[in-house]
C-alpha cells in the first residue's frame, strides 16, 4: 500500500475549493432536470375552462407551448388552432384550412350543405419538425391530413385519403405512422411515414371490439399514445342509464390484446351529462392533465381540465375518476382567453374569433368600403338564413351573456333582410326587412324544432337610421329571475340606450342535425335578385 503524504494547509484549502467547484458545476447540470420535476408556481383553475363550444379537442406540447385543435364542422375557416402556456387560457392563433372543398356542399347549391358534418375530431401531432392535423370530413366521406412547419402561421399542405377514418387518432411510433379510428370496433390503420398514403400491403385490423350490451355509445373519440412500455387508447363510452364515461385501454403490444378500465365517470356541475372525450397531456415538469368536454345543452360542448394520476399504470382522471370543479394546475398562470371577443370592425382583416357559415362570400368588406364598419352583401337569393351564404358567426357564451350590434339597414333593397341571429337548427333572429312597399320593418323570426320559420313580430320603422339589436342568452340560470335554461330573448333600440324587449323567448336546443352550440350571427340575405347590403358598426358580447 502506498503511503499518502498529508496535504499542507494551503493545498488542503485549494483541494477543498476544487471539490466544491466540481460539486457546484454538477449541480448546474442537475438543476434543469430538477426543474423538470417541480413547477415554479401553480394556480387554481375553475371548470369549465371557457363556457363555450370547444368539443373534440386534441392537444400537443412542444417545449413550453401547448396547441389545441377543436371541431367546428361546416364553419369556415375550419379546424381552429389554439395556443396556451398554462393549459387553461387558450387563444385562437390560426386555422388549418380556409375552405375544405369548393363544391355544391360548401356553396349550399342544389339543396346541399354540410350541417352536422364537415370537419370532425381532428388529431394533432408534432413529428420531426412538422405539425400534422388529421380529420374526417363526413360530407366528403374522406380523410384529410394537413402538415405545416409553422402551426401559427402556416402554410398548410394537404393530403386527401379516399377512405373515411371516423374520429381518427395518429401515433408516430418507431418509424411507423398508425391511425386508430372507428366506434364500437376500433381499427388500426398504417400510413406511409409521411402520411401521404395508406401503407401498401397492410390491412386495417380491429384491435378493440368493445362490449355491445348495455351501451348507448361505444368506444368513440379515441386518442392513442405510447407511454413507457404501454400502448394506451382513451375513448368515450356512454352506458345506458348512466353518464358519459372515459375508458382507457392498454397493451404492451400495439396489436393487443388490450385490457380496459374506467378512468373518468360521474355527474358534473349540477348536470347529469358527465364529462368525457379528449386527450391527456404532460407538462415539462412531469405532471399530467386531461382535457375532457361536457355536453352542456344549447351553449354546446364545453371543455374542462382534469388532473391525471397514474395508478398502477392507469391514467386515472379527476378525483379518483370523479370530475372536479376546481383543479390545481402546476404551471405558471399565463395569458388570456381568446375564443370569443368584441369587435369594433376598425381593422382591415377579420378577427380570428369569427367564422362564416359554410364558404366565405365572394363580396364583403371590412373598413375598405366604409371605414369602421363591416359590410355584408346578399349573395344571390335565399329563402331563409340557413340557406344563405355570407352569415358571419361567433360562439355564444354561458352561463348568461348578451350579444349586441348596431345595424345601418339603408342599403337593403326590397326582399333584403339583415340583423342578429341566435343561430342553430332551432333559430331566432331579430333584424330589419325591406318589403316590396320599399319600407323598412323591424322583424323577429323564429323557428322551432323541425318547423318552418315564421314571423313572430314586426314593427314599421319611420326612418332609415341605425337600429341597435340585442340577444340575451340564458344557458344556465344564475338567479331566479333568469327563468328556465337555454332561452334567448330579443330586444331593440333606436338610440342605443333604451332597449325594448319583444314579448317572446326562443327555447334553444342542441340538435344533432347541426351538431354545434349556438352562435351569434350577423347576416344579410335577400329573397329577391335585386341585391342588398347592410353595415354593422360593432359587435359586443359580454357575460353578466
Image (spheres, rainbow, N blue to C red):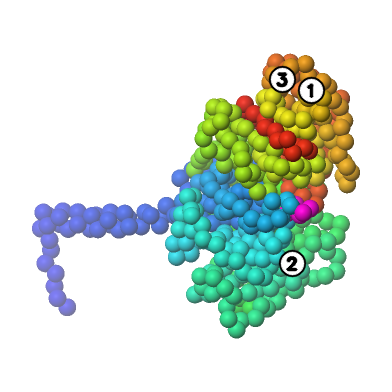
Over which residues does the magenta segment extend?
110-116
Residue 505 x/y as whole percent: 85, 31
Q: What is the C-alpha distance between the residues marked 3 and 1?
A: 9 Å
In the picture, which quadrant includes the N terminus?
Answer: bottom left
Q: In which quadrant of the rendered view does residue 454 lie?
A: top right
Q: Kindly identify the residue that appears in the image at 58 percent across and 63 percent down.
A: 145
Which residue is tagged 3?
464
Reading the chain from its start, which is encountered first: label 2 or label 3?
2
Q: Is residue 63 or residue 120 the one in the foreground?
A: 120
Is 286 located above or below residue 451 in the figure? below
* Label disc, if present, on residue 28 of the rendered structure: none
Mark 3 secondary-structure assignment = loop
Q: Of 243 and 219, which appears nearest the observer? A: 219
Q: Position of residue 264 (x, y in %)?
A: 71, 56
Q: CA distance from mark 2 to mark 3?
A: 55 Å
Image quarter hosting the C terminus: top right
Identity of the residue furthest to the front in this view: 530
Q: Is residue 428 left or right of residue 401?
A: right
Element under disc 1: loop
Q: Residues within 10 Å of mark 3 (few under 14, many from 20)?
A: some
Q: Label 2, on which residue?
A: 183
Q: Residues within 10 Å of mark 1 (few under 14, many from 20)?
A: some
Side of 227 where 529 appears, left or right: right
| Extreme-right residue of the structure | 451
Where residue 181 appears, as percent x and y from the top left, is 68, 68
Amino acid at each position: 500500500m502506498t503511503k499518502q503524504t498529508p496535504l499542507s494547509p494551503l493545498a488542503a484549502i485549494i483541494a477543498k475549493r476544487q471539490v466544491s467547484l466540481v460539486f457546484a458545476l454538477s449541480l448546474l447540470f442537475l438543476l434543469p432536470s430538477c426543474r423538470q420535476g417541480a413547477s415554479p408556481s401553480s394556480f387554481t383553475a375553475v371548470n369549465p375552462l371557457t363556457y363555450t363550444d370547444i368539443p373534440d379537442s386534441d392537444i400537443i406540447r412542444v417545449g413550453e407551448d401547448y396547441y389545441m385543435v377543436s371541431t367546428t364542422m361546416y364553419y369556415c375557416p375550419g379546424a381552429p388552432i389554439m395556443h396556451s402556456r398554462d393549459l387553461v387560457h387558450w387563444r385562437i392563433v390560426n386555422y388549418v384550412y380556409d375552405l375544405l372543398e369548393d363544391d355544391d356542399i360548401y356553396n349550399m347549391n342544389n339543396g346541399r350543405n354540410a350541417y352536422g358534418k364537415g370537419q370532425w375530431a381532428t388529431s394533432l401531432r408534432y413529428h420531426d419538425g412538422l405539425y400534422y392535423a388529421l380529420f374526417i370530413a363526413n360530407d366528403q366521406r374522406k380523410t384529410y391530413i394537413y402538415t405545416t412547419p409553422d402551426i401559427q402561421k402556416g402554410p398548410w399542405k394537404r393530403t386527401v385519403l379516399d377512405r373515411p377514418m371516423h374520429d381518427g387518432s395518429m401515433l408516430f411510433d418507431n418509424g411507423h405512422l398508425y391511425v386508430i379510428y372507428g366506434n364500437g370496433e376500433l381499427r388500426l390503420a398504417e400510413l406511409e411515414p409521411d402520411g401521404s398514403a395508406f401503407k401498401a400491403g397492410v390491412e386495417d385490423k380491429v384491435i378493440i371490439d368493445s362490449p355491445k350490451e348495455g351501451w348507448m355509445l361505444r368506444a368513440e373519440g379515441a386518442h392513442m399514445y405510447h407511454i413507457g412500455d404501454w400502448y394506451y387508447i382513451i375513448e368515450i363510452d356512454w352506458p345506458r342509464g348512466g353518464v358519459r364515461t372515459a375508458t382507457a385501454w392498454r397493451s404492451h403490444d400495439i396489436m393487443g390484446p388490450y385490457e380496459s378500465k374506467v378512468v373518468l365517470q360521474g355527474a358534473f356541475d349540477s348536470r347529469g351529462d358527465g364529462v368525457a372525450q379528449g386527450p391527456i397531456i404532460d407538462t415539462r415538469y412531469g405532471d399530467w392533465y386531461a382535457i375532457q368536454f361536457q355536453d352542456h345543452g344549447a351553449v354546446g360542448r364545453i371543455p374542462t381540465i382534469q388532473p391525471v394520476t397514474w395508478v398502477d399504470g392507469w391514467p386515472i382522471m379527476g378525483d379518483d375518476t370523479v370530475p372536479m370543479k376546481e383543479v390545481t394546475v402546476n404551471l405558471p398562470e399565463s395569458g388570456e382567453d381568446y375564443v370569443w371577443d368584441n369587435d369594433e370592425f376598425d381593422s382591415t382583416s377579420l378577427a380570428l374569433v369569427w367564422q362564416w357559415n359554410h364558404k366565405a362570400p365572394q363580396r364583403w368588406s371590412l373598413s375598405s368600403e366604409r371605414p369602421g364598419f363591416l359590410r355584408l352583401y346578399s349573395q344571390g337569393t335565399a329563402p331563409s338564413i340557413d340557406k344563405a351564404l355570407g352569415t358571419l358567426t361567433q360562439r355564444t357564451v354561458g352561463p348568461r351573456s348578451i350579444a349586441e350590434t348596431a345595424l345601418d339597414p339603408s342599403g337593403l333593397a326590397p326582399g333584403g333582410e339583415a340583423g342578429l341571429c341566435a343561430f342553430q337548427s332551432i333559430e331566432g333572429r331579430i333584424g330589419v326587412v325591406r318589403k316590396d312597399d320599399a319600407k323598412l320593418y323591424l322583424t323577429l323570426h323564429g323557428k322551432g324544432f323541425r318547423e318552418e320559420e315564421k314571423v313572430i313580430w314586426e314593427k314599421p320603422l319611420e326612418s332609415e337610421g341605425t337600429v341597435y339589436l340585442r340577444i340575451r342568452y340564458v344557458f344556465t340560470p344564475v338567479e331566479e329571475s333568469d327563468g328556465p335554461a337555454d332561452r334567448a330573448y330579443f330586444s331593440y333600440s333606436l338610440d342605443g340606450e333604451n332597449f325594448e324587449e319583444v314579448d317572446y323567448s326562443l327555447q334553444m336546443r342542441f340538435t344533432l342535425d347541426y351538431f354545434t352550440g349556438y352562435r351569434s350571427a350577423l347576416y344579410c340575405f335577400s329573397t329577391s335578385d335585386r341585391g342588398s347590403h347592410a353595415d354593422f358598426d360593432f359587435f359586443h358580447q359580454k357575460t353578466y
